[in-house]
Amino acid sequence: MDREPLIKTLGGRITCPRCQALSKRSQSQCKKPAMQGKRVCRNHGGASCGAKTPEGKKRRDNARLVHGRETRALRDTRKHKLRELRELEAVMAEIGMI
Ligand SMILES: [Zn+2]
């Protein structure tokens, strides 16, 4: 589902960026305008300035998994394997296999 980038407020007189958050329950897009310079409204985290304390930043880094199937360790493994694959492909191209 595509999200609407803009919303009209004040009876259609003002066009502004629309909150890009989706409802958990209905999966429909939030109907509020986004906060200035942000992608989401105040209710969906637009007022948050992020973690400030070292403990909070550490907790954020450890907890920022959206679904648990993608981790930094998995990304590192994939990055190294893809690098190996590119090197192998370069060698194969050099010797005329591909
Ligand atoms: Zn919102």
Image: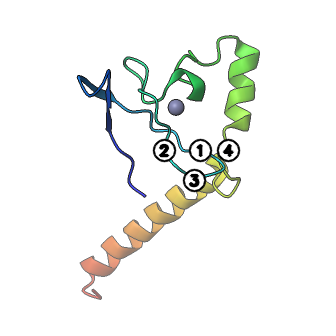
Secondary structure beneath label 2: loop
Residue on which the image places disc 2: 29
Which tag, 2 or 4, sits closer to the chain's start?
A: 2
The residue tagged with tag 4: helix, strand or loop? Answer: loop
Q: Residues within 10 Å of mark 1 (few under 14, many from 20)?
A: few
Tell which circle, 1 or 4, labels the residue nearer the N-terminal end. Answer: 1
Q: Specify which label sits upstream in the sequence, 3 or 1.
A: 1
Q: Mark 3–mark 2 contact, CB under 8 Å?
A: no
Image location of residue 27, percent across then percent down: 57, 52
Q: Which residue is mark 1?
A: 23
Residue 67 got which mark? Answer: none
Residue highlighted by disc 4: 65
Q: Position of residue 44 (x, y in %)?
A: 57, 29
Above or below, 19 against 97 in this view is above
Front residue of 73/32: it is 32
Residue 96 position within the rendered picture, expressed as x and y whole percent measured from the top left:
24, 86
In whole angstroms, how far apart are the C-alphas of marks 3 and 2? Answer: 30 Å
Mark with earlier residue (4, 3):
4
> Dot 3: what SS?
helix
